[in-house]
Image: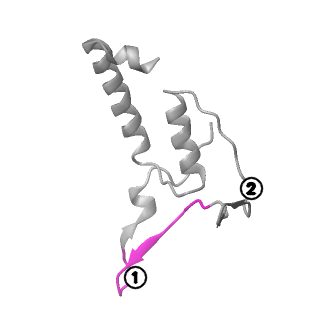
Amino acid sequence: MLLPRLSSDTGAREAAAEACRAIADMYPLCRSITGDGVRRTLDIVEGIVPLQREEVPTGTMAFDWEVPREWNIHDAWIADREGHRVVDFRATSTSSAIPRP
């Protein structure tokens, strides 16, 4: 359990180090409200605390909101007038192809 572990200096330091590792692993992931980046993020969190996941099909109503289609980005860029990419998703992302565990 996490709370008793935090009561000692050593346990708190270990928990902080574990949290920093998880944050470093999650930071580069491309997350939207749905998609592989969210799943990979939950995989990392689940390595720390137990989770129960449920997938909800696209189109399901949740109160006044409809669950959207899953979205996974594979490529995106901003180009200047000459067509040179000045911002390039593939060049700056480690998550354009996220392996499923």
> Residue at 31% of width from left, 14% of height from top?
7
Q: Give the left or right position of residue 29, taking residue 21 as reference.
A: right
Give the number of the disc on residue 12: none
Q: Give the left or right position of residue 10, taking residue 67 as reference.
A: left
Q: Position of residue 89 (x, y in %)?
A: 44, 63
| Residue at the farthest left position | 9
Under circle 1, the secondary element is: loop
Specify which label sits upstream in the sequence, 1 or 2.
2
Question: Mark 1 sits on what residue?
Answer: 83
Question: Mark 2 sits on what residue?
Answer: 57
Q: Is residue 66 above or below residue 35?
A: below
Q: Is residue 15 above or below residue 43?
A: above
Q: For the magenta stretch, what is the residue range? A: 71-85
| Residue at the farthest front position | 63
Q: Nearer the viewer, residue 55 or 93?
A: 55
Q: Is residue 12 magenta?
A: no
Mark 1 nearby-residue class (10 Å; few <14, some 14–19, many ≥20): few
Under circle 2, the secondary element is: loop
> Residue at 28% of width from left, 20% of height from top?
13
Q: Nearer the viewer, residue 92 or 47?
A: 47
Q: Quadrant of residue 70?
A: bottom right
Question: Nearer the observer, disc 1 or disc 2?
Answer: 2
